[in-house]
Amino acid sequence: MANLFEGLTPDEESFLEIIIMLEAGALQGLGKLKNPVEGKTKLNLQQARRSINAVEMLYRRFSDRLTEREKEFVERVLSELRLLFIKVSEGERRS
């Protein structure tokens, strides 16, 4: 994909930045991204679930106002996070 923000309005850029921040929070909670403060990964499924729920809420609340490009981006993020959440949480149950 070309530059994610290419050709977007300032509002569209801000919306995608919020989604990316929430995605990072979910990835941190899933132990897939280092916490920038602690410098290490840590599993926190509650944090991951809250971040995913926040992305879902924003998508529901604003979907009628989003461009196709924004919708596709949020749908991809949600799909990837949901699958990863299932894999990680199943792995935790087996431990």
Image: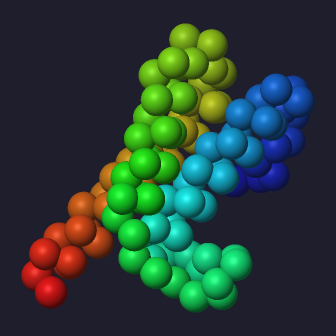
Q: Quadrant of the C terminus?
A: bottom left
Q: Position of residue 56 (x, y in %)?
A: 44, 35
**Image-based side of 87 in relation to 45, left or right:** left
Closer to the camera in the image, 17 or 36 = 36
The mark total stands at 0
Q: In the picture shown, does residue 53 fall above or below 12?
A: below
Q: Could you say which quadrant of the image residue 69 lies in? A: top right
Q: Position of residue 27 (x, y in %)?
A: 50, 66
Q: In the picture shown, does residue 23 fall above or below 33?
A: above
Closer to the camera in the image, 1 or 22 = 22
Q: Could you say which quadrant of the image residue 36 lies in? A: bottom right
Residue located at (82% from left, 43% from top): 5
Residue located at (52% from left, 84% from top): 41
Q: Could you say which quadrant of the image residue 11 lies in? A: top right
**Image-based side of 16 in relation to 30, left or right:** right
Q: Residue furthest top?
A: 64
**Image-based side of 52 in relation to 90, left or right:** right
Q: Residue furthest left?
A: 94
Q: In the picture shown, does residue 27 fall above or below 42?
A: above
Q: Position of residue 10 (x, y in %)?
A: 88, 30
Which colour style is shown?
Answer: rainbow
Residue located at (39% from left, 69% from top): 44
Residue located at (41% from left, 41% from top): 53
